[in-house]
Amino acid sequence: MPKDDAVRGDRALIDEAALIDSAGAAPPLPEYPTSSPYPVEDVAGLDELADALLTLRTRDECRRFLRDLCTLGELEALAHRWQIARLVDEGLPYLEVAARVRTSTATVTRVAHWLRHGTGGYRLALERAGRGG
């Protein structure tokens, strides 16, 4: 992501945090297409990792691969982000999401930012899981 986009993204994150009202409610999620003008950054090995994930056929295979790949802390962080994305997409107030997932409102705001303004990965997965949009 170009530096200007990163700065704009940080500003959007701060702006979203300012929109949370005293009850922890956030603005409703606007409808966004699953494609995004923001490309996925080049990360060495990311294509190979994505290809490896695509070879897995069952939930058990995926769970075992992820456990071998990640520490327990990393798995918990990934699982929490997915839980947050699902709850934010359902329209729950940020404070309630934070309480349910046992995380900070800053983390909820960060995930909500990527759900709204990211590369479309969360949205695509939510739609395919039958939960999005």
Image (cartoon, grey):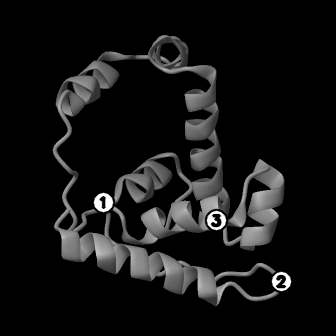
Using the numbered discs, state the Cα–Cα distance from disc 2 to disc 3 in whole angstroms.
Answer: 15 Å
Q: Nearer the viewer, mark 2 or mark 3?
A: 3
Q: Residues within 10 Å of mark 1 (few under 14, many from 20)?
A: some
Q: Position of residue 27 (x, y in %)?
A: 61, 85
Q: Taking 43 as reference, is 13 left or right?
A: right
Using the numbered discs, state the Cα–Cα distance from disc 3 to disc 1 in whole angstroms.
Answer: 20 Å
Q: Position of residue 38 (x, y in %)?
A: 22, 65
> Which disc number belongs to residue 23?
2
Q: Amino acid at mark 3?
A: Ala
Is 120 rendered above or below residue 75? below
Q: Position of residue 69 (x, y in %)?
A: 44, 16
Q: Residue at x 74, y 88 (%)?
A: 21
> Which disc number belongs to residue 119?
1
Q: Residue at x 22, y 52 (%)?
A: 40
Q: Secondary structure at mark 1?
A: loop
Q: Earlier in the sequence, mark 2 or mark 3?
A: 2
Is 90 rendered above or below residue 41? below
Q: Amino acid at mark 2?
A: Ala
Is 129 rendered above or below residue 115? above
Circle 3 residue? 106
Is 119 rendered above or below residue 78? below
Q: Quadrant of residue 124?
A: bottom left
Q: Taking 98 as reference, is 18 left or right?
A: left
Q: Is residue 28 visible?
A: no
Q: Residue at x 43, y 81 (%)?
A: 12
Q: Residues within 10 Å of mark 2 (few under 14, many from 20)?
A: few
Q: Residues within 10 Å of mark 3 (few under 14, many from 20)?
A: some
Using the numbered discs, state the Cα–Cα distance from disc 2 to disc 1 in whole angstroms.
Answer: 29 Å
Q: Nearer the viewer, residue 69 or 58?
A: 69
Q: Is residue 62 visible?
A: yes
Q: Quadrant of residue 46?
A: top left
